[in-house]
Amino acid sequence: MEYTYKQEFIRFMVSNGVLKFGEFTLKSGRKAPYFINTGNYKTGKQLAKLGRYYAACIRENNLEADTLVGPAYKGIPLSVATAVAMYHDYEKEINYCFDRKEAKDHGEGGLFVGKQLEDGEKVIIIEDVMTSGKALREILPKIQAAANVQIVGMIISVDRREKALDSELSAVAEAKKQFGVDVYSVVTMDDIIAAIEDGVIDGKEHLSAMYKYRNTYGASL
């Protein structure tokens, strides 16, 4: 069977213990039938593959950018791996940079390591997941203080498409509403459910719980 990059990514998450099924209590207090633990990414091989999935997402959505910005800390290796994959897979040379937690006041100085942002530059933010939008909220003022850039979008690995505790909107929809930033994901909860339904991954015994969770907590898009 030939898989799409989205299906391959879901299989990749399962095989690396990142995507698990069962009963999990989330930080929000909700009981979820699946859990995503990106802390299980820890090898060079995993990172190389992650970069290729992010690059495929950028390509699929026809996004054009000069620089990838990886918010510290999880976004740092992801932005580097994605920049490498963009060159390796699509012969697209693209800059990368990441923020410092504190501005450096000696040497080259500045808030960013890597490409120094310039006015008019097109930027894509690279992050692992989006739960509350905290990473976006923290990185935006730094980017805007550095230069008058155009933020083309933000790429995350999984969009849970789950409404927040105090809103009918998902974190992705809230990001668009609050900050005007389009967020694209490699896969969504719907893709994960479809992968089970289609036999891409095992887990048909969890489908009932997945449907119920989506019906209860699924967000307005």
Image: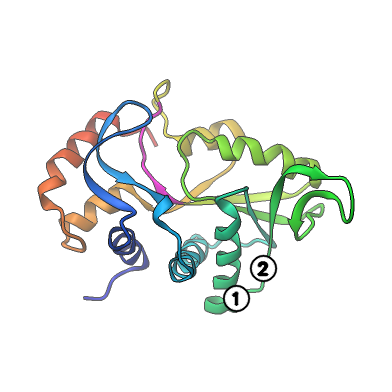
Question: Can see residue 73?
Answer: yes
Range shown magenta: 157-164
* Position of residue 97 measured from the top left corner of the image (x, y, whole percent): 70, 57
Could you tell me which quadrant the C terminus lies in? top left
Residue type pointed to by label 1: Tyr
* Residue 159 among those drawn in magenta: yes
Residue type pointed to by label 2: Ile
* Residue 214 among those drawn in magenta: no
Badge 1 crowding class, 10 Å Cα cut-off, few under 14, some 14 to 19, many 20 or more, is few
* Dominant SS type (magenta): loop
For the residues labelled 2 and 1, say whether their Cβ atoms are less than 8 Å apart: yes
Please give the name of the residue rendered at 67% of the width and 68% of the height, measured from the top-left corner: 94
The earlier-in-sequence mark between 2 and 1 is 1
Relative to 181, does residue 64 appear above or below in the rendering? below
Badge 2 crowding class, 10 Å Cα cut-off, few under 14, some 14 to 19, many 20 or more, is some
Which one is nearer the viewer's eye here, 151 or 15?
15
Could you tell me which quadrant the N terminus lies in? bottom left
Please give the name of the residue rendered at 55% of the width and 76% of the height, measured from the top-left corner: 90
Relative to 158, does residue 85 appear above or below in the rendering? below
* Position of residue 37 measured from the top left corner of the image (x, y, whole percent): 37, 48
**SS type, badge 2:** loop
Q: Residue at the far top: name it.
A: 166
Q: Which mark is residue 195?
A: none
Q: Which residue was labeled with disc 2?
A: 94
Relative to 214, does residue 39 appear above or below in the rendering? below
**SS type, badge 1:** helix
**In the rendered image, which quarter is residue 209 located in?**
top left
Q: Which residue was labeled with disc 1?
A: 87
Relative to 12, does residue 28 appear above or below in the rendering? above
